Structure formats: structure tokens, C-alpha cells
Image (cartoon, coloured by chain):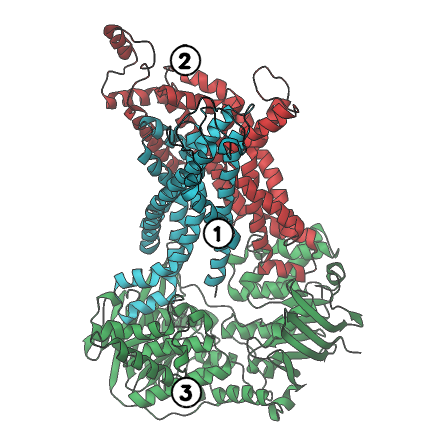
Chain colours: A cyan, B red, C green
Amino acid sequence: MKRSGAILLFVLVLAIIGPWLSPHDYLSTNFDDMLRSPGLSGLHLFGTDDLGRDLFVRTMLGIRVTLLVAVVASLVSLVIGVTYGAVAGYVGGRVDAVMMRFVDTLYALPFIFFVILLMVAFERNFLLIFVAIGAINWLDMARIVRGQTLSLREREFVNAARLTGVSTARIIFRHIAPNLLGIVVVYVTLTIPQAILVESFLSFLGLGVQEPQTSLGALVDAGVNQMEGASWMLLIPAAVLALILMSFNFLGDAMRDFFDVRQTP
Amino acid sequence: MLLRLLGAIPTLLLVIVLAFLMVHAAPGGPFDDERVLPTDVAANIQAAYHLDEPLPQQFTRYMAGLLRGDLGPSYRYRDYTVSELIGSGFPISLQLGALAMALALLVGISSGTVAALKQGSMLDRVVMSLAMTGISIPVFVVAPVLVLLLAVKLQWLPAGWSGESGFAKFVLPVITLALPQIAYIARLTRASMIDVLGCDFIRTARSQGLGSKAIIRVHALKPAMLPVLSYMGPAIAAILTGTVVVEEVFGIPGLGQFFVRGALNRDYTLVLGIVIFYAALIISLNLVVDILYGFIDPRVKQR
Amino acid sequence: MSLLEVNDLTVQYGNHAVVDTVSFTVDRGESVGIVGESGSGKTQTALSLLGLLPRNAKMTGSVRFDGEELLNRGENHLDGFRAQRIGIIFQSPMQALNPYLRIGKQLRQILLQHKIATGNDADAKVIQMLDRVGLPDPERQFLAFPHELSGGMRQRVMIASALICAPDLLIADEPTTALDVTVQAQILDLLEELRDDMALLLITHDLGIVAGRCERLLVFQAGKLVEAGATVAVFASPRNEHTKRLLAAALRADRGEVLAPADAKTVLGVEGATVSYRDSHNARLQAVVGVDLSLREAETLAIVGESGSGKSSLVRAILGLIPMQGGRVVYAGEPLEGPVELRAAAQRRDLQLVFQDPVSALNPQMRVQTIVGEPLLVHESTMTAESRKDEVITMLQKVGLDESYLRSYPHQLSGGQAQRVAIARALILKPKILICDEAVAAIDSAVREQILDLLRMAQHESGLSIIFISHDLAVVRSISHRVAVMYLGRLVEVANSENLFALPRHPYTKALLDASPVPDPLVAPVAALLKGEIPSSVSPPSGCVFHPRCQYAENICSERRPELRQIGGARVACHRAEEIDLSS
């Protein structure tokens, strides 16, 4: 767990300060210097792309954008998911049954189709990417939170609080919410890679972040086009993407195991 | 049972309405990309496709056609109706998807089971690391990399589709499509099997002297498969999504490719048709999964 | 040569030994009991005999069965002994049976595996076995799933599965702990009946069971065997300190201490209480029907009954945690009604509840100080944080926990400590009425005594009235002034504690008393006369709900519902109360 945390931190730091390490910026094109393979000449650590732009800086930028989109989108799905799940779980009964049926049906639909439609419909608005991704990912969070809320509601300490005279508001905030925190954190960590995947996929299709901004997915897309001649354009962003995803997944897994032990008495 | 079927219909309707709205909400029309036409000709074309009517009317017209089984003509591929296009693209996507699903289940369940039985061993760790890698690398990364390696550099397998004959052309696309699902299913099977093997009734079975083969076959397998079965719904959806990428990368003329083209071309009817078709397909497959689940878990009450 | 010889058996996890150099023998046909508190290593020992412990358990020593070594042998070798030579039944039958398979299939697999029978022959043998263990309609049960059976029936199925190959030794690990006391008696009788010349190794925490059913007894403490001998001898003159303590706790509870009669002033009155709700199948369940009770100041009223009796539902309805469909409750002259959230603060602070499961009753994310202090926060808003903390410390000291526990989290506490925290929380507002819902059921006997002492002391000091719910009559006897017996949601008898135990007036009360194991090896256990199990609350029997199981039932009993009436010093709901003689 510590290792993946460390890797992520490293990547994050790199993304923030990286561009300053290189004399190049992410958009100046240099047609004399196109498709240079990685090396130290001209200080193009990762080489250049087909427009002569430095790949290192662009990759760093890509990391920033990818992470930004992923985190914001995850927060969006967190807010929607937790609220939906907590309400369904606490109110229970018919309301819960209906709400969960809705989630179940949505779960199976290929949301990605809708997202693509949305993206095409609204002309690649950057803000909309967040909304779209958040809209796909909230289902998992809602399910988990609802399950946890349901079991918490049955715990006697909630009844004890009711008996003592604790107000409903205090019950929700002081008693139920802290017990949800653990599981929410775990699942946010796991939602982020999903969000990254969605964003990358969209960029790959050309529907995501627009030029000259770039994300890891867009870089991969560009790399595919240059695959045969300049393989580094594909491999480097792909490797970075995979690394980030793996780290988040490992981190989330480890956290889930950690919290499991705490919860079971 | 009947209730579940009835419950599925509103979902489908919801999908149709949403899709319809989104498609028509997009700025621009299906004919904007083409050469600029004189206004009266453009107006005539709009009228011919009923695009000048108010939205609700267009919707009713569409629904009526839908009930007749007519999904309308494609705006882009003028000589074909949407139904024909779906008819030509679907069998290919179906083949890909079915093969990928079968592969995923086969490899996923067996590797997950083996990993669970040898929990903690080197084999277990290797399998799980591979699985982790599988879910961390997106399909659209794996596909081109595999093509680069196996088709271009090593020349073992064909890189494209059209013009190729025989089974070889299926190999790369199917594997690419199946990889993330193999990983998910392996992880899921392993976790589920470990859970089941830790249950008290397995200890009872051991105490009855049943031996590990019989224990797994008779007692553990059914309950361990439940989470995998539940996952089938999302898995199918994921594979459908994956076909979009795979078809792009390998140039396969399947439904996924049609969809993306249609979206980019504002080919309303095509896009709508595909979305509705897929949604109906997934909803019915989910019903089947639900029913199967009820057969395995006797505690699920049939209301 | 003994059937089973255990020598220097040690079971370790990492560096921690849960079983420490234990040696004992079991002879053919003998019944041996293993007693001890939770964590004493009894179950670990039992499981190690058949090699059923998890992989990370390290075992040393020797376990010889009929001359052959069993310890640390491979699965294949052990499989030759399991079921065929040694059978084992576990504590909780719902967990121990595979919920996804039909009963018949699970049992026939044993026969198939050991090549004893196949096909229809195997089916026939299974049905025969199901019949032998007393399952009604065995052909139907063959096709049933575990969740369709009651707890008692499931345990019978477990016994069937353990005995179907006629082993020489049966290990029974807390076989009746999860069952109602009348069902427990049936199951223990069944084991005795089926035993023939099979040896029995019975593991339990209940000295009463051991006294009645085991010829020899082994006492475990913290992984060590501290005393062994013939049951009669050990009970008469125990040599080990721990054994003496266990016996003292058991006997004290059984003998009961006669307490001073309470004040006459009534504090709480319940009239015609009725509680019902819909279960998962949407059927209406009558949990409580027409119950009248009163509680006096400084009095302890016990409510006893088995599962389905409605005791928990009754008190939760009184407290407003669940709705009451009929009847009224009066507290201090004022009606007590509506959901707890809407009640007056004064009413809420005066009635408190201690739950059965202390772990579930404490918020795992809160420290002890916050937990115990929260009631003050709600009701005494004028107190400063300092004075609150002082009050909490005082309260903790009263329950026997010192200041160092203030910053602890619930998962760091033992069961007994957690329950004390729960009691501290309940008592900190100085309530007038404390309801204990099976508050000591999950606690070991030594600690249990301390908690009961605590309650008695609180009552003595402040005139606290207590409603004590329990299924354990021994505990009830030692703490209550009056006892109310409930069956299927109805009151069947209410009497002074002394009178009830000396002379029960209702057949059900008598059955409960008879079924409770007596920790005296010289007293033979009473054969369970009560057949069958508690019927469902959805469609209760007509007339007197107890009549299908009552040996004194006559026509009138199935026609008319008996009212509670005064007979001698008790109120009894039985048509034949004057006629039948229940003195034992």
C-alpha cells in the first residue's frame, strides 16, 4: 500500500513541477525537429511528436489533465452516489426498493454510448466531460453506501442514540456518517481509475480534451497514428497511464482490505 | 417473471426517449457537412426527412415506425435503412463479443479458481498481478500495442480485417476484447471462491470426509459462481463498449464502428437505432441472468 | 486401550498457544464433557482432533484414535476417519449447513463418498436417518433447503449427518447454545437416545448440561486443562481454583438469592399491549398480544420466554422504538405513547435500555468518553465539558472501569467491558427504569456475576426499577423479585420469583423449569416432555396458543383463549390451572 501511494505521489509531483524541468513548452511546434526519438539531444527526454513538440512536457501536461478530470469527476460521482445511497439506505422500505431498482437497471446499460452521444451533442465542452464521467460512476458508490447505511441503521447504537434523545441530525452526522467514511474513501480511490479510463477512452475517440491541451488518452490516440514509425509516442504515454491506473487500483485494494479488518469486530 | 418483463419496458422507453432527445439536441444536422446546397433544395431535403417538423411530432413518427419494426433510413448511408445496417454489422460484433465472453469466462474462472485454491503461493501472486495489469491497461492501449508487436513487428497475425480470410483474423481482436474481462472475472472468482471456502459449511463438508474434489464440485462451486453471474450484466455492457474500440483499431465493420461514425456524422436514425438495439439486447440478457441467479440461490424469493 | 488418547496437544497461532499441552482420554461408550469459558480452547481442541483447523494453526503432540495417530496427518488419511469413525456437530446449524443445497443431497453425498450406498438405496438410508432424528415428514424434508427449517430441526439434520455412518465417537461442539432451552432439552435427549455404545465428547460452557449428561468432565482455562475427573467427584470437591469459581457462579445462580420484597408504588403500567408487524413475505406477525404488566419502584421484574415469545418486541414498543398497535402504557401518571423521537425529554431520560450485544450497541468510531458522555450532552446542556468529563469518570468507576478507559474504542474492549460501558451510558442520567434485554447472555459466567452485582447495587442505591429479559432461568432466579412468563406473544404466568420457582402454575412454566439444566450431577435431567417447536406467529393455534404442545390440554383449551386470573399468589392464563398439579 505504501508503495503505490509513493508512486502516485511521485507522479503527481512530477506532473506539477515537471514542465519546469525542461526548457520546452507544450505547444511550440518546431518543424525542424519532428519525430525525434527519445534521448538527450536537444533535451528532449521523451523525444518529440509529429509537430516537433517535446513529448516529455506534453506527457506531464497529459498527466495533469488526466488526473484533474479524474479527481473532479470522481468527486461529482461521490456527491451524487453518497447522497443517493445514504437516502435510500436510511429511509429504507419502498423508497429504497424503487431507488435500487432504478440503479440496477442503469447498471447494465452501456452508458458509454450515451456519453459519446452527449459529447458529440454538446461539442466537446470541457465541463461536460466531468459531468459525463461522474454520471457513469456514481452507481457503484450509491450501491456501496446504501448497503453500508442499511447495516448501520440496524446496529443497536443507533437505537441507543434514539433512546437517549439524540436528534436525528446528530445521529446522521455523528453516528452514521463517520462509519461511512472508511468505505467511501476506499471506493473513491477505486473510482478514480474508472474515471481515468473513461476520459482516456473519450480522448482516444477524439471526443475529449481538445488541442493543444492534451491528456494521456489523447496522447495515446496520437501515438497510435504514429505507431509504426515513432513507437515511443505510443509506448511512453501508455506506460505512464498504465502505471497510474495500477497504482490507484493497488492503493484502493489495499485500503479496502485494511478497512475490512477494522469493521468486523 | 412476468413482472420483471413488464419492469423492463419502462426502462427501454426511458432509453429511447433520452437517446432521441440527446441526438436531436445536438447542434447541427445530418446534412451540414456536405457541400453547401441552395436553400430551397436544402429545405426540400429537410422536409423529405421530416426534420422540419416539431420535435414531439418527429418522436411520435419515430415510435410508430419502431413498433412496426422500422428503424428508419440512415441519413448518411442513403441507400440503406438502419435495420439493414444493423443487420450487416451486428453478426460481426456478435461473433467478436460472444467469443470474447466465452474466452473470458473460461480463462477467468479457471485461473481464479486455481489462484484461490493455491492462495498465497507464487502461482496465486503471479496470476493476480497479471489480472491487476489486465484491468489497469485500457483496451485502446492494449489493442494498438498488440498490433504493433504481433502483427507489424513479428508478423504472426494479420493486422487488419477486410481481405483476410480464415480464423486468424479473429485472434487478436477477440483476445484484446477479452483481456480486461478475463482479469475482472479472475479476480472476482478468486475472491468469491476464497470467501466460500472460508464458510462454515465447507468445514462441515471436510468433517464429513468428502475430499477436496467433491467439496468443490458439490458444495463450493455453485455459491462461488454467484458473484460472477451477477457480474455478467455489466460484463456484457463492457464488452459491447469494447467492440467500439476494437473495431476502430482493427478496422472491423461492426456495429461499434457504425455507431461512432454515426455519432460523428449526426446520422440520427442510425445512432438511435443502434442504441435502442443494444439497450434491448442488454436488458433481455440481464433478465436471463436474473433468472439463472434464482436457480442457483434458493433463498431468492420469486415475487 | 482407550478409544481416544490425546497427549500433550498444543495448538499455536504464531507465538500464541490457544491449546497448551492438553492430555486426556475418552473410552469406548463414555460420555465426557469439556467445560470452560469462551477463549479457553475447547473448540480449538475439538477441531484439532479431526484436523479441521485453519492452515496457519501449528499443532504438536499426539492424538491417537483406536491406536492410530491422527495429528498432522494428510487430508486423505483423515478422510478415512471422518464421518465413519468420528463424527462432529457444530454450534450454529444455520452456518454449518450449505444453504444452496437441499438437505437430502448434502446427506447422501456422505454415503456416496464413503461408498456405503448409491442411488435410491442412498436416498432411502438418508430418509431413514432423518426419521430417526425425529424430523416430521422426512420425505419432504429430504427435498427441503436449510432455511426452510427451524433451528432445532436443522440441528437434528446435523446430527443425522454426523451419525449416518455410525461412528465410534461423536464430538459435539456447543450443540445447543444457539437453541431455545426447551428445544435444547429435546436435542440433548435425542443425543442420549441415539448414542448406544458410541462415545460422546460434549463441549459446552454450561455446567448444568455437563452435570446432567456427562460421566466425566474436563475443565479448560486459557488453553490449559486444569482439572479432570468423574463429574460427581469434581462437583462435590473441586480442587482447582478456576473450577471452584465456575461452580460457584453456576450454583449461586441456580440456588437464587431471596431478595427483599419491593415497595408497593407502581412506576410503570402496561395495559393490553399489542405489537404486530409485517415480515419479509408481507404476512402479519403477531409479536405481542394483549399484555398487562406493572412495574413497581425498586423492583426487578423478569420477563422470560423463548424465541418468538415477544419479549423484545414488547419492551421496544414500550420504549417507542417500534410502534404499538394497541393498548396503553402509563409512566408516572402520564401516558407514554408515540415514537421515541417525539416524546418529552423527561420521559426519554427516565427509561433506558441495555442491549444484548454490547459490541453492536457502541458506535465503533466513538471513544468511551464520548459514548458515555453523550446523554449528558443532550439532556444537561448547561454542563461544561469539564464537569461532563468528571461525571463520566464517576460513572465509569461505579461500573468498575478506571479512568484509563476514557480514550478507548469499542473494538479494544472485551465483551464484559463493553457491556459495562453500555450500562454506564444507560445509568448516567439516573433513569428510573432500566430495561435489560438479554444483557448478560453473551457474557461469561464470572463477569456475568459482576454485572448482576452492579445492577443490584444500582437498584439498592437509587431505587431503580429493572425489567430483566432473559431466556436463562438460572440468572433470572438470582436477580428478580417477580417473573412474567411469555409464550408466543402472550402472558401465561406472572408471579413472585420465589413462588414461581417453587410451584409453577402454568404447564409452559413447568416445561421451562424442567428443561433448564441443573448444575448438580446427582439430579437426573428431566425428560423433555414438550414436543415440537414454537408455532409461527403468523397463524397461531386457536384458543390457548400453547394447547398443541400441552400434555394437559382438553377440548376447552383449543376453543377458548384463557384469561389471566389469580390462582394462589400468581396470575395464570390456563383453563385448568386449579386442577393440574405441577409440583415436581
Q: Are marks 1 and 3 in contact (CB under 8 Å)?
A: no
Q: Chain of mark 1?
A: A
Q: Nearer the viewer, mark 1 or mark 3?
A: 1
Q: Are marks 2 and 3 in contact (CB under 8 Å)?
A: no
| Mark 2 secondary-structure assignment | loop
Q: Which residue is mark 2?
A: B77
| Mark 3 secondary-structure assignment | helix
Q: CA distance from mark 2 to mark 3?
A: 88 Å
Q: Nearer the viewer, mark 2 or mark 3?
A: 2
Q: Nearer the viewer, mark 1 or mark 2?
A: 1
Q: Amino acid type of disc 1?
A: Gly
Give the side of residue C564 with respect to residue B176, left or right. left
Give the side of residue C106 with respect to residue C345, left or right. right
Q: Which residue is mark 1?
A: A5
* Residue C231, horizontal then vertical, whole percent: 64, 86
Compared with residue A170, is residue A217 higher up or lower down, i.e. above or below? above
Q: Chain of mark 3?
A: C
Please tell me how crowded label 2 is: few (under 14), some (14-19), or many (20+) other residues with Cα within 10 Å: few
* Residue C84, horizontal then vertical, whole percent: 73, 64
- The answer, for residue B243, to whether it is visible in the render is yes
Compared with residue C246, is residue A218 higher up or lower down, i.e. above or below? above
Give the side of residue C170 with respect to residue C92, left or right. right
Q: Which residue is mark 3?
A: C453
